[in-house]
Amino acid sequence: MPQIPFIISDGDPRDPLRVLITGFGPFASYTVNPSWLAVKKLNNVVLETEGAVPVTVNQPEVLSDAASKKSQRPIHITTIEIPVTYSAVLSTVPGLHARPPTLPTSTDLALTDDSAAPLPPADGYDLVLHVGAGARGDLHVEKLGHKLGYNMPDVDGKLAPVVAQCRDVDDSGEEDPAERFDHERIVDVGKGEGEEHVMRGFAEGYEAYNEELTTGIDVDELVKSLKESGVEHVQSSTNAGRYLCDFIYYGSLAEAQ
């Protein structure tokens, strides 16, 4: 794994790019979610980008030397923990994309008194990244989020909102490996009787959005770049599992429009 140079922020004056990263709260047998363990220590960290080769988001071409020097701004990271509940995602994600953003109060005692952290940027974050725990194996970089098909209860035993929909999302009835992994992690919480033909997902307020929303980031190029830099176990994906990882991704893509 390549080493990334970083320093802890003490109030960087160089107009850094602002990045928000979310991880998830406790789930099933995990008293601390691995996704939160992976990102929490990045809170209020500044990554130095000097010497890095910048690539544009929508067109994977290297910028000119002059543009490169101008674009080599430090990257300030903020991390927050999101409960593994549909209601938390629905109530929190719109605020993450507001201008200025509104962030939930941290429940992690290590972050509750972080007075050195800057306020959310008035014009919004430059990038919002959602991290979730997956099955053993490669790191998956998701290309899209799904609007419908959320039939698994969250950690509170609650289900996603009912959506007026007549057809099934997947007529084959076969589970994707990511969906199967999330099913296997659900413990002691069963789906209610009579739920088999109820479509659940994003309902009121999301009627105009397509059933799949894709990121504007060139995921294939990103994966290629990561592999070239030494991150071997990474691949692109088009199914985050139709559970909270998928749910927060779709909601974030919708709110970012």
Image: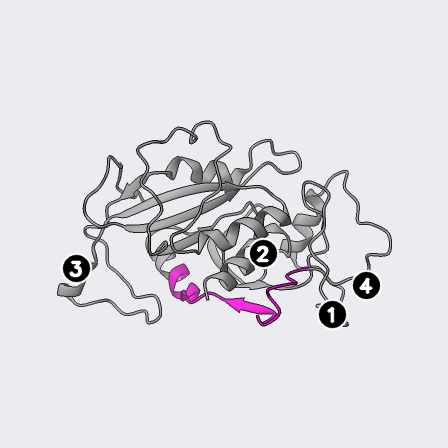
User: At which x and y percent is residue 143?
Assistant: 50, 64
Q: Residue furthest right?
A: 193
- Where residue 165 is drawn, which disc sits there? 1
- Residue 143 visible to the viewer: no
Q: Earlier in the sequence, mark 1 or mark 3?
A: 3
Q: Earlier in the sequence, mark 1 or mark 4?
A: 1
Q: Amino acid at mark 2?
A: Asp
Q: Amino acid at mark 4?
A: His
Residue numbers of the magenta segment: 201-223
| Disc nearest the viewer among 1 and 3 | 1
- Where residue 197 is drawn, which disc sits there? 4
Give how far apart the Cα atoms at labels 3 and 4 are: 54 Å
User: At which x and y percent is residue 47?
Assistant: 28, 44
Depth order, front residue of 232/244? 244
- Residue 126 visible to the viewer: yes
Q: Amino acid at mark 3?
A: Lys
Q: Are marks 1 and 3 in contact (CB under 8 Å)?
A: no
Depth order, front residue of 65/201? 201
